[in-house]
Amino acid sequence: MLTLTHGFKLRQLASTQEGQFSQRGEGSSDIGRAQRDQDSDLTNNVDVSFTPQEVEIELRSLLPNIKLQEKAQQNPCETPRDLNVDLKFYQQIGAQWMVYMERSPTRGGILADDMGLGKTVQSLALILMQPSTDPRRKATLIVCPVPIVHQWADEIEQKTQKLSVYKHYGPNRIRDERKILSYDVVVTSFSVVSCEWNESRTNGPLFRSAFHRVIVDEAHTIRNLSAKKTKSCLELEAEFRWCLTATPIQNAIDELSVEFS
């Protein structure tokens, strides 16, 4: 989602950097070798194909996103009028950063705040501050694990004054995509998204819909690029895309490949 369009590129960059350090003779001690052995878990089986100049270009391309964070810190948003809770100061910064990211070429990002810091309420603030101007694709789709589908819907109903919400879940869920897109927010589960997806994208209404925004909550659960659950989420059509997770990386840097997609 950020400037690097594929997560595996980060892994290749890390491997390239490691090779450059080794060529300069650094890390020749036992400690250095041990560190390289540990780092190899991140970079093994990687085709190193980046020059130092290409590495610099790619890393510099991330700087605009860092500047957006600094800009948000200097200009935090006010709590949206239709939000029933007051945003804490750090949430005002986070919500403003999300607005800036949607206005940037990346058109989304990864919100990786720790658990309990309010990723949900910041997302609701974003939805209120950045509504769609196209009535044909006004809905924000939230994809999350089954246990928190109802929790998301309850949070929306309790904390916002005007957002209409629909839980797209269960055997009696709506099959008409026009009705689905009439809501401000649609909440569904990974299992429903996976069920409605196939290679031709002709079955489920979620894949006949063009959403304003897709927010994937607990995004660390879709790290396997070969899994149907992951592929189906990547096929959802939206103008803006967000991943919410407190653990963007657990074991290796290439786990970001899905979250960057």
Image (cartoon, rainbow, N blue to C red):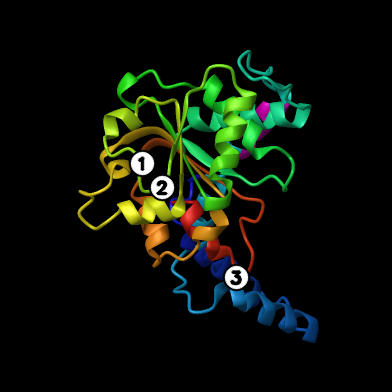
Query: In this picture, is 211 found above or below 18?
Result: above
Residue at 63 percent across and 29 percent down: it is: 95
The residue where tag 3 is placed is: 20
Tell me the amino acid under the disc marked 1.
Answer: Arg
Q: Earlier in the sequence, mark 3 or mark 1?
A: 3
Q: Which is more toward the observer, 164 or 16? A: 164
Q: Is residue 67 left or right of residue 146?
A: right
The percent position of residue 182, horizontal first and vertical second, equals 35, 24
Residue at 54 percent across and 59 percent down: it is: 221
Residues at discs 1 and 2 in contact (Cβ within 8 Å):
yes
User: Mark 2 or mark 3: which is in front?
Assistant: 2
Tell me the amino acid under the disc marked 3.
Answer: Gln
Residue at 71 percent across and 31 percent down: it is: 91
Q: Is residue 215 left or right of residue 98?
A: left
Res 30 quadrant in image:
bottom right
Q: Secondary structure at mark 3?
A: helix
- Please provide the residue range marked out in magenta: 66-73
Q: Which is more toward the observer, 246 or 174? A: 174
> Which dot marks residue 10?
none
Q: Main secondary structure of the magenta part?
A: helix
Outermost residue on the top side: it is 81
Res 176 quadrant in image:
top left
Q: Which is more toward the observer, 56 or 108? A: 108
Q: Secondary structure at mark 1?
A: loop
Res 206 quadrant in image:
top left
The residue where tag 2 is placed is: 170
Label 2 CA crowd tier, 10 Å (few <14, some 14–19, many 20+):
few
> Which dot marks residue 173?
1
